[in-house]
Image (tube, helix red, strand yellow):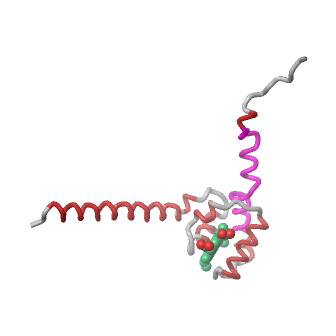
Amino acid sequence: MLNSNVLRKRSATLVIAFFLAAFAISQAEANKSGALPPGKGRDLVVGTCTLCHSASIILQNRMTREAWDETITWMQEEQGLWELEAADRKTILDYLASRQGVEHKIKKDSGKRTNSMYEFDYKPNPL
Ligand code: HEC
């Protein structure tokens, strides 16, 4: 017969299993193409770039086209990324530079005032 101690241990195991499963699912979510913004070349990026790590490593980074290019070369030289067809590399870079580029971020944030000192537009002192 099960005593309450065993039951308590079992439910603790269940709770842990639940959180592990939830974590695994959220990791899998990040891997899905849905995590990457839509755009031309997204499928190619998902197919090429989410085999060794999740898409979130891409989403965490914003770089210029040159820096993305260097990152790909670095992964080829150091991390086992294979040689890409020239056309594929261009499509991937076009996507990364436009979706995970730096201009995108600057444009989105420009005009936003982050310093609370400038929250109000002070009129110049008329005196
Ligand atoms: C053959 C496996 C492999 C493939 C395919 C791959 N990567 Fe990586 N990538 C790695 C490894 C390994 C790391 C290092 C992970 C770490 O440091 O934990 C990495 C790291 C990164 C980083 C982080 C770089 C940094 O400075 O920390 C980015 C961004 C990245 N990859 C983007 C991409 C993109 C974009 C593609 C598709 C063109 C891609 N990866 C395909 C293996 C791969």
- Kindly tell me whether residue 48 is visible in this rendering: no
Left-right relation of 112 to 36: right
Left-right relation of 87 to 29: right
For image coordinates 63% across by 69% down, the residue present is 44
Most prominent secondary structure in the magenta stretch? Answer: helix
Identify the magenta region: 91-115
For image coordinates 90% across by 17% down, the residue present is 127
- Coordinates of residue 81 in the picture (x, y in percent): 65, 79
- Coordinates of residue 105 in the picture (x, y in percent): 72, 51
- The answer to if 5 sits in the magenta stretch is no
Left-right relation of 88 to 5: right
Ligand 1: give its quadrant. Answer: bottom right
**Closest to the observer: 102 or 122?**
122
For image coordinates 75% across by 56% down, the residue present is 102
- Coordinates of residue 12 in the picture (x, y in percent): 28, 61
Q: How many marks?
A: 0
In the picture as drawn, the residue positioned furthest to the top comes out as: 127
Quarter of the figure with the N terminus:
bottom left
Determine which quarter of the picture holds residue 125.
Answer: top right
- The answer to if 106 sits in the magenta stretch is yes
**Closest to the observer: 76 or 7?**
7
For image coordinates 78% across by 27% down, the residue present is 121
In the picture as drawn, the residue positioned furthest to the left comes out as: 1
Determine which quarter of the picture holds residue 79.
Answer: bottom right
Determine which quarter of the picture holds residue 8.
Answer: bottom left
- Coordinates of residue 11 in the picture (x, y in percent): 25, 61
- Kindly tell me whether residue 72 is visible in this rendering: yes
Compared to residue 120, the image places residue 9 above or below, namely below
**Closest to the observer: 100 or 93?**
100
